[in-house]
Amino acid sequence: MKRNNKIIAVVLCAMLVFAGQVFPSEETTITGTVYAVAWDNDDNVIEAFIEGEGEDYIITDDSVGHQLFEMGGAYVEVKGVIGKDADGNRTITVVNYQVLRP
């Protein structure tokens, strides 16, 4: 029984460490260019990413992030939370942003 408790404790610790890597909650700042990458049948942008400092981040489609979808080509400073989607792609949930160059 003690061995099972140790195994459970190790697994829980590993899950917490892994969750911290996949879903970090620390806010960070990314500076880069916004690119639209997917559109619906009505030509509305449904996916965009920011290319910043050698890394690409898919912009989460929420109320703030969606505002960037129509800013393809703009150079922006984005503050947000970095994470990963189900496919392992880096994402950014935008808290706020500033357009540096349209």
Image (cartoon, rainbow, N blue to C red):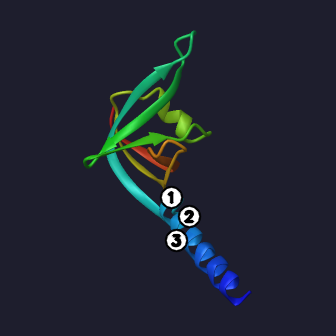
Residue 61 to residue 79: above or below? above
Residue at 74% in and 86% down: 1
Instruction: Pick the residue in front: 14 or 68.
Output: 14
Q: Do residues under tags 2 and 3 come within 8 Å of each other at their CB atoms?
A: yes
Nearest the viewer among 21 and 13 is 13
Q: Quadrant of residue 98?
A: top left
Rendered location of residue 74, percent (x, y): 34, 33
Q: CA distance from mark 3 to mark 1?
A: 9 Å
Is residue 25 visible in the rendered structure shown here? Answer: no
Q: Residues within 10 Å of mark 1 (few under 14, many from 20)?
A: some
Name the residue located 54 percent from the left edge and 41 percent from the top edge.
60
* Count of marks, rendered view: 3
| Amino acid tagged 3 | Val
Quadrant where the C terminus sits is top left
Residue at far left of view: 54
Specify the amino acid type for callout 2.
Ala
* Mark 1 element type: helix
Residue sitting at the far top: 42
User: Which structural element holds mark 3?
Assistant: helix
Name the residue tied to disc 1: 22
**Residue reaching furthest right?**
1
Residue labelled with disc 3: 17
Question: Which residue corresponds to mark 2?
Answer: 19
**What is the x, y in percent for residue 95?**
53, 52
Q: Are marks 2 and 1 in contact (CB under 8 Å)?
A: yes
State left or right for residue 27 relative to residue 33: right
